[in-house]
Amino acid sequence: MSKPLAPCSKCKGEMSMKILDTFHGDSGGVKLTIHEMPYVGCAEGHKRFVHVEFAGQLMDLMMDKGTYQSVPSAEKKGFFTHTYHCSGCKLELPRASTASKTLEVIAELNKAQPLKVLVEIPVFKCGGCGKECIQSTEETAMLAVKGIGHAYRSIDIHPT
Ligand SMILES: [Zn+2]
Ligand SMILES: [Zn+2]
């Protein structure tokens, strides 16, 4: 037997486990769609995360460079003004993104059923060899974390 869920902090209503269909967030061209996220909700539609660490764990996963390892990262050159170069042939990449790639991330977080996050990332195709790179894994990770924050706010979900 699992212990009963604490009542809603806003209306004191009874809470139950629910699954959100999809919701979205984006930041700086990185777009996230979160599918089937488990949460705890009341009849009034107030939402909280399934446990206190859940929100941070999902953000940590978005922050993890390993999440983006399937897409090559460009080489950044310059100090004050940056240019991005193909990791294959070293040619400078176009300034504007040429396409986007969608990564499917399965998040298996502590004590919660797995959910799926689709991360759409702008990619830059090399005019020389045709390889597609993201500009920077670190910046992509930062934008994805901000995007997750926006997604949480869009559905008004809280840790308690
Ligand atoms: Zn409530
Ligand atoms: Zn190239």
Image: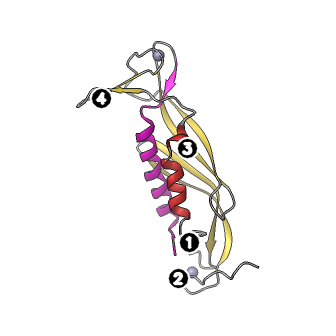
Amino acid on which the number 2 mark rests in the picture: Ser
The residue at which mark 2 appears reads as: 9
Where's residue 102, x and y in %? Answer: 58, 38
Considering the numbered disc 2 on the image, is that residue within a helix, a strand or a loop?
loop
Ligand 1 near label 2 (Cβ, under 8 Å)? yes
Q: Mark 1 vs mark 3: which is more N-terminal? A: 1
Q: Is residue 135 magenta?
A: yes
State the CA–CA distance, disc 1 to disc 3: 23 Å
Separation (CA) of disc 4 from disc 3: 25 Å
Q: Is residue 139 above or below residue 6?
A: above
Q: CA distance from mark 3 to mark 2?
A: 32 Å
Dot 2: few (<14), some (14–19), or many (≥20) neighbours within 10 Å?
Answer: some
Circles 4 and 3: CB atoms closer than 8 Å: no
Residue lying furthest left in this view?
A: 80
The residue carrying mark 3 is: 119
Kind of residue at badge 3: Val
Which is nearer the eye, 130 or 43? 130
**Residue 138's spot in the image, x, y percent?**
42, 40
Going 54% across and 31% down the picture, which residue do you hit?
71
Give the x, y percent position of residue 127.
45, 15
Please give the range of residues in magenta. Answer: 131-160
Q: Which residue is mark 1?
A: 48
Across the whole image, how many numbered discs are drawn on residues? 4
Q: Residues within 10 Å of mark 1 (few under 14, many from 20)?
A: many
Q: Amino acid at mark 1?
A: Arg
Marks 1/2 in contact by CB < 8 Å: the verdict is yes
Q: Earlier in the sequence, mark 1 or mark 2?
A: 2
- Main secondary structure type of the part rendered in magenta: helix
Q: Earlier in the sequence, mark 1 or mark 4?
A: 1
Mark 4 neighbour class, 10 Å CA radius: few under 14, some 14 to 19, many 20 or more: few
Query: Disc 3 or 2, which lies upstream in sequence?
Result: 2
Residue pointed to by mark 4: 82
